[in-house]
């Protein structure tokens, strides 16, 4: 039985009854009229009735057949049979889309999902080579479907399948390994239309060999349009599953410094995140740690619930400035690539900060500098510089990791402009108020209707009444990073702080206030004590009281003052936020000064990588920076080498890791997949049972034979119509005329 490319059009066969309907209508229009000559004609008709009816029936059948042939042509009949294969001489094009994302390294027994996929590809080629009909073959890996230049790079492109082709393909497949990417099938599916341009002389079979991970296939809305276009084009679509079940896997999901000061010889914490991609809890998970290649004490995580991610901290300290390498490693499991994670921590020799004090004796700055730079055995890495307000407009500010404004009466416009530019480019600004501050200046020049640095308008100075009954702490700690260490029962020293005076702000945020404005600390009467807002890429934090002892006793020997100021500095500097984390396939970016360095940057891959060194040209980015970019094909530590115009060389290292989400090995069941792809005509098969699919497209299209048949019918219809009609001979006609 033939099949049809557009079976819905077969309803049009009902139109074939239209000639019959017209014939019946014409019959009902006849009227009986008796007259003398009619008797003679009736007698003649009775003698020829059978012959006339046969001619009319033949004409009617020809017209019905012509209409039916037109409808069948539009439906595009196809004969998928052995006889159709003999008639059809078109080439069968086998297009294999091979998933090589790192989840395909899922291992069981002595094989992996990627090994099973490669064996299936070999079997397809071997079966095709045994067929008498012409065959061609294309192979495209997911990771090569859309490179950095946006173009697909097939490993095999429309190669004719001959006797030696299976051996050639097997040699190619032996060289292929799963990539470290987390790329999905979308680009590969779109390449079926964009790269493998449809040739009318071929019939296509598409094999999608993948592991059907739930992350991409549970809700495949972005894949459905491409799948529908493939199936509607008359292409046979095979979805081939390369895994048989879900296996437990543990992934390293993160490795980065926590919030705190990052500087040489200053202790800090790193945080490692471990994800449990299984239905069972994990106990006593061991994480091995290395720092600059030296093993550190292993980190033991007591328990990780099923499907959860747990974060644990561990301390580090590097005595020297510069880039330091940190690595975390898990024990082997189903997928090995996500058991290793790298980080590059760049530590400066010190952290310069600028303290601008408006008072003559710089009293507040002295207290704050003592907290940020206490000296003695405690190393903070912070170098505090105390200056007068005019310093802001007369010197560059980019070298400072934070700027503190203390009890300022006013600033000139150039200083305000310099501060705003510093903050907008990512700098942190902190303000402490005091007796010299006036609401008029802060509201008009620093707040400016929500457009300036200051978060909220000032109302005026207020005194905090003494609480002689309940004796509640004057400061209510919040969960903000600056005060988080004092939350709960850990605020014993903070509870000893006494606030005498402060500036009040509106209880309700004004409509013009920036959306990022937030109250991060309050007094016991509910009034705001500390505010914050974002300004461009930077942060602004305001304390509505003094940094020194003029309005409070916080700076008078209370240990919580030192802790809070160090946390404030860490928050303003944003070292943890600025920490760069790159994934495989991301564009690595190295900014450079075109006045100091040549634009050519050489990229050295990790030592264990099979990739070769590459060179990229620096260019100006959309944000105005001059930088060189490079797409990392695998994980590890990459080194970017810059050549100075003075002959010097500088190297910068960047850590690249696999996407931990690809380590979730949950799969979509076939029933769920069929529901999600309800509008797609496909065949789902496990890789182990996949058979040669050429028979599905073997056969002949009946469109051309139907066209020839239609032309014959139309010609025959005209001849029979002339024959059946009443057309007098020319001689008789001429005689009658005379």
Image (tube, rainbow, N blue to C red):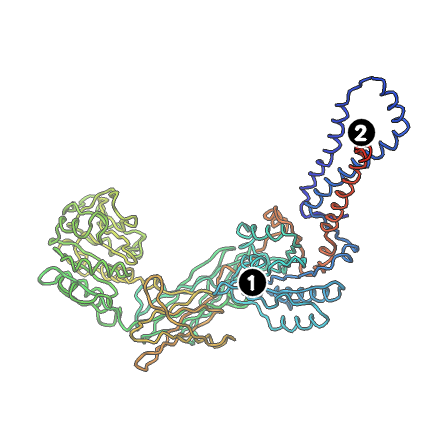
At a point 79% along the width and 40% down the height, the residue shown is 719
At a point 70% along the width and 65% down the height, the residue shown is 123
Gap between marks 2 and 1 measured at Cα: 84 Å
Determine which quarter of the picture holds residue 273. bottom left
Give coordinates of residue 39: x percent, y percent: 87, 20
Picture layout, residue 88 above or below residue 270: above
Q: Which mark is nearer the camera, 2 or 1?
A: 2
Picture layout, residue 20 above or below residue 136: above
The residue labelled by disc 2 is: 736
Name the quarter where the C terminus is drawn.
top right
Q: Which of marks 2 and 1 is nearer the N terminus?
A: 1
Give coordinates of residue 641: x percent, y percent: 38, 76
The residue labelled by disc 1 is: 142
Residue 174 shown left or right of residue 278 in the figure = right
Picture layout, residue 691 above or below residue 296: above
Give the SS element for disc 2.
Answer: helix
């Amino acid at each position: 039985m033939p099949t049809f490319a557009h079976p819905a059009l077969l309803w049009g066969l009902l139109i074939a009854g239209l000639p019959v309907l017209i014939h019946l209508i014409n019959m009902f229009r006849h009227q009986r009229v008796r007259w003398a000559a009619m008797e003679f004609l009736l007698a003649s008709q009775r003698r020829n009735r059978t012959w006339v009816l046969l001619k009319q029936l033949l004409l009617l059948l020809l017209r019905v057949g012509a209409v039916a042939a037109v409808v069948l042509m539009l439906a595009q009949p196809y004969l998928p049979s052995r006889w159709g294969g003999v008639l059809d001489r078109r080439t069968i094009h086998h297009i294999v889309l091979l998933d090589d994302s790192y989840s395909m390294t899922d291992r069981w027994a002595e094989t992996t999902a990627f090994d099973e996929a490669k064996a299936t590809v070999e079997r397809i080629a071997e079966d095709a080579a045994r067929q008498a009909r012409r065959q061609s073959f294309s192979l495209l890996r997911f990771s090569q479907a859309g490179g950095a230049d946006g173009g697909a790079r097939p490993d095999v492109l429309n190669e004719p399948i001959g006797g030696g082709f299976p051996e050639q393909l097997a040699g190619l497949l032996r060289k292929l390994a799963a990539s470290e990417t987390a790329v999905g099938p979308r680009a590969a599916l779109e390449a079926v239309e964009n790269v493998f341009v449809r040739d009318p002389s071929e019939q296509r079979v598409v094999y999608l060999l993948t592991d059907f991970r739930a992350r991409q296939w549970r809700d495949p809305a972005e894949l459905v349009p491409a799948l529908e276009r493939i199936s509607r084009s008359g292409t046979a679509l095979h979805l081939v599953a390369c895994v048989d079940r879900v296996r437990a896997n543990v992934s390293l999901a993160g490795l980065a410094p926590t919030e705190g000061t990052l500087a040489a010889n200053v202790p800090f914490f790193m945080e490692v995140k471990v994800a449990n991609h299984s239905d069972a809890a994990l106990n006593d998970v061991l994480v091995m740690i290395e720092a600059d290649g030296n093993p550190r004490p292993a980190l033991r995580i007591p328990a990780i619930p099923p499907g959860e991610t747990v974060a644990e901290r561990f301390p580090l300290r590097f005595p020297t400035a510069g880039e330091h390498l940190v690595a975390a490693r898990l024990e082997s499991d189903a997928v090995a690539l996500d058991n290793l994670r790298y980080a590059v921590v760049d530590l400066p020799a010190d952290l310069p900060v600028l303290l601008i004090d408006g008072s003559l004796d710089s009293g507040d700055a002295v207290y704050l500098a003592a907290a940020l730079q206490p000296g003695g055995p405690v190393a903070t890495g912070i170098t505090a510089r105390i200056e007068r307000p005019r310093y802001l407009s007369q010197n560059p500010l980019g070298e400072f990791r934070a700027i503190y404004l203390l009890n300022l009466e006013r600033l000139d416009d150039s200083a305000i402009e310099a501060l705003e530019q510093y903050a907008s480019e990512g700098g942190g600004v902190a303000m402490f108020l005091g007796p010299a501050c006036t609401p008029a200046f802060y509201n008009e020049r620093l707040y400016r209707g929500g457009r300036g640095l200051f978060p909220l308008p000032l109302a005026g100075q207020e005194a905090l009444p003494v609480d002689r009954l309940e004796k509640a702490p004057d400061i209510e700690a919040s969960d903000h990073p600056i005060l988080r260490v004092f939350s709960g029962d850990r605020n014993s020293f903070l509870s000893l702080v006494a606030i005498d005076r402060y500036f009040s702000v509106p209880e309700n945020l004004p409509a013009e206030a920036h959306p990022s404005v937030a109250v991060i600390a309050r007094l016991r009467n509910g009034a705001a004590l500390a505010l914050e807002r974002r300004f461009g890429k930077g942060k602004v934090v305001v304390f509505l009281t003094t940094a020194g002892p003029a309005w409070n006793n916080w700076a008078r020997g209370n240990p919580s003052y030192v802790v809070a100021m160090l946390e404030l500095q860490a928050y303003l500097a944003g070292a943890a936020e600025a920490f760069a984390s790159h994934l495989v396939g991301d564009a690595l970016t190295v900014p450079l000064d075109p006045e100091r360095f040549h634009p050519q940057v050489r990229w050295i891959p990790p030592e264990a990588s099979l990739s070769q060194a590459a060179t990229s040209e620096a260019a100006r980015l959309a944000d105005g920076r001059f930088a060189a970019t490079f797409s990392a094909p695998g994980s590890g530590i990459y080194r970017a080498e810059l050549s100075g115009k003075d002959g010097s060389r500088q190297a910068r290292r960047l850590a690249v890791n696999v996407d931990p989400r690809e380590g979730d090995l949950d799969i979509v069941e076939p029933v769920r997949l069929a529901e999600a792809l309800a509008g797609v005509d496909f065949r789902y098969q496990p890789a182990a049972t996949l058979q040669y699919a050429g028979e599905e497209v073997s056969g002949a299209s009946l469109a051309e034979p139907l066209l020839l048949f239609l032309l014959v019918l139309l010609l025959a219809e005209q001849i029979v119509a002339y024959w059946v009609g009443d057309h007098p001979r020319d001689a008789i006609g001429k005689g009658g005329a005379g």
